[in-house]
């Protein structure tokens, strides 16, 4: 019975995940996915505890089952954070534990104990345990839907004077657009910053970060806000930054960056030098200016800019759309995208997030089979056409696909568009929507990809 309980606790969440995507494919709102990510591991614990708790102290058996899974999640967190280096557990993994971890794990322990206690009553009825597990599955199907009804993101909102966000509904293939518009002339206190994960680890600035993978935006956001607060700024929204090099659990920079006027990483590792452009931000006359150039010299990086990202790929420059050749960002792949545009006089800037329910990997499989029948997301030409329709003369694209992630603060709450999954696969498609299988972990942010750095829009307090 113990083995069966453990099996239920581990396998049931895996089976429930595709049901959520099936519901989305049949017409349910995609907003049910985030609450389902939280609920699936808890349902698995409850189902396992119903089996192992059939005794005098069923709550204790359920508690032990939940404790085993919490231990598994804790070890997984440490391995992800330090790449398996035990010496870094105390320096990297443990300090990055948050209240969200403790809350999730405490909730798991309570769920196991309560389900184990309920097991005694259910065991007295014929087929009681099976009915209990069936009831848990029904709860799993209905609670995310109810939660989504009360947590709908606003279609439009104001983040600060001169800064608005507008969301467009999902298209039939699961693509959704979020556009942030900032009027820098109306609000000259607006500024742009970069948070780099490597500058916030045990060896800052060594161009090597063992913790980039789990530093998804929900975990990085408090650190982004802390950096902005030290500079007298309030973060309005944030998104993923430029391209980086991924080596299993670790990452390194392909291009330089400038953070708070200090240049880092004099490296140029992009395969396509033709697409290696640099985007810098500096103040002229008290207002932020955008500078997009090709092949910056390192001395200019060190002296001219408050903030800069290297390796951005231009889509439009000075009102002209560039020829889109194969290269950085996979030109013809339809996937999630992060793109920034601005006016000729830098009086307005625009941040576009293209959300895709499918993952980057399945999209690449579709592209190989038939490029014309890809589902979800934008390719580079679609991005370019969007900026053309909007009349924006300058636009670049950052890293995308599974790296795309975004958060904005409106109506007193943070609204996240999460990145792709670390451990997932797409089983198939229904109504142009993917049916995905993902690894259920607590907190769910374990599942999501992180990046080397983040770009954020902030308002200076003075």
Image (cartoon, rainbow, N blue to C red):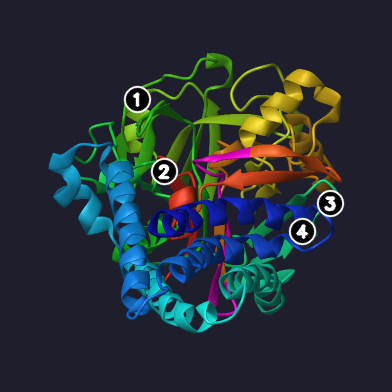
Q: Which mark is residue 348?
A: none
In this picture, residue 12 sits left or right of residue 201: right
> Which circle's residue, 2 or 1, is located before the other in the chain?
1
The count of marks equals 4
Query: Does residue 424 belong to the magenta stretch?
Result: yes
Q: Quadrant of residue 17?
A: bottom right
| Inter-mark Cα distance, 3 to 4 | 16 Å
The reply to whether residue 347 is visible in this rendering is: no
Q: Which mark is residue 23?
A: 4
Q: Residue at x 85, y 25 (%)?
A: 372
* Residue underneath mark 3: 171
Q: Nearer the observer, disc 1 or disc 4?
A: 4
Image coordinates for residue 280, horizontal then vertical, percent: 48, 39
Image: magenta residue range: 410-425
Q: Nearer the observer, disc 2 or disc 1?
A: 2
> Which circle's residue, 1 or 4, is located before the other in the chain?
4
* Residue underneath mark 2: 453
Q: Quadrant of the C terminus?
A: bottom left
Q: Are marks 3 and 4 in contact (CB under 8 Å)?
A: no
In this picture, residue 304 sits left or right of residue 415: left
């Amino acid at each position: 019975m113990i083995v069966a309980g453990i099996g239920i606790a581990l396998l049931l969440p895996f089976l429930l995940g595709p049901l959520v995507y099936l519901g989305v494919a049949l017409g349910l709102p995609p907003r049910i996915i985030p609450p389902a990510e939280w609920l699936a591991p808890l349902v698995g614990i409850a189902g396992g505890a119903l089996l192992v708790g059939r005794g005098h102290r069923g709550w204790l058996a359920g508690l032990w089952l939940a404790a085993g899974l919490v231990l598994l999640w804790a070890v997984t967190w440490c391995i992800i954070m330090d790449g398996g280096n035990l010496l870094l557990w105390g320096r990297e993994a443990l300090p990055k534990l948050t209240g969200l971890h403790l809350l999730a794990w405490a909730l798991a322990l309570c769920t196991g104990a309560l389900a184990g206690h309920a097991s005694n009553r259910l065991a007295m009825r014929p087929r009681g345990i099976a009915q209990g597990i069936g009831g848990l599955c029904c709860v799993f199907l209905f609670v995310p839907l109810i939660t989504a009804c009360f947590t709908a993101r606003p279609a439009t909102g104001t983040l600060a004077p001169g800064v608005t966000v507008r969301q467009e509904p999902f298209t039939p293939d699961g693509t959704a657009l979020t556009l942030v518009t900032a009027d820098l002339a109306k609000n000259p206190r607006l500024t742009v910053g970069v948070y780099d994960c490597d500058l916030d680890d045990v060896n800052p600035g060594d161009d090597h970060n063992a913790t980039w993978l789990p530093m998804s935006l929900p975990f990085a956001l408090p650190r982004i806000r802390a950096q902005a607060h030290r500079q007298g700024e309030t973060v309005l929204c944030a998104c993923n930054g430029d391209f980086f090099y991924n080596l299993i659990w670790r990452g390194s920079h392909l291009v330089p960056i400038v953070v708070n006027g200090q240049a880092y990483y004099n490296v140029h590792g992009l395969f396509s030098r033709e697409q290696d452009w640099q985007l810098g931000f500096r103040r002229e006359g008290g207002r932020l200016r955008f500078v997009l150039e090709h092949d910056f010299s390192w001395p200019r990086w060190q002296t001219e800019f408050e903030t800069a990202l290297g390796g951005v790929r231009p889509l439009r420059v000075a009102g002209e759309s560039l020829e889109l050749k194969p290269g950085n960002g996979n030109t013809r792949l339809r996937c999630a995208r992060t793109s920034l545009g601005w006016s000729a006089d830098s009086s307005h800037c625009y941040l576009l997030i293209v959300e895709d329910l499918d993952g980057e990997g399945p999209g690449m499989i579709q592209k190989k089979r038939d490029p014309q029948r890809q589902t979800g997301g934008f390719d580079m030409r679609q991005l370019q056409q969007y900026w053309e329709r909007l009349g924006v003369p300058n636009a670049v694209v950052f890293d995308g696909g599974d790296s795309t992630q975004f958060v904005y603060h409106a109506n007193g709450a943070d609204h996240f568009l999460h990145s792709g999954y670390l451990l997932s696969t797409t089983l198939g498609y229904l109504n142009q929507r993917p049916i995905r299988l993902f690894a259920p972990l607590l907190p769910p942010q374990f599942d999501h990809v992180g990046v080397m750095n983040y770009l954020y829009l902030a308002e200076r307090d003075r």
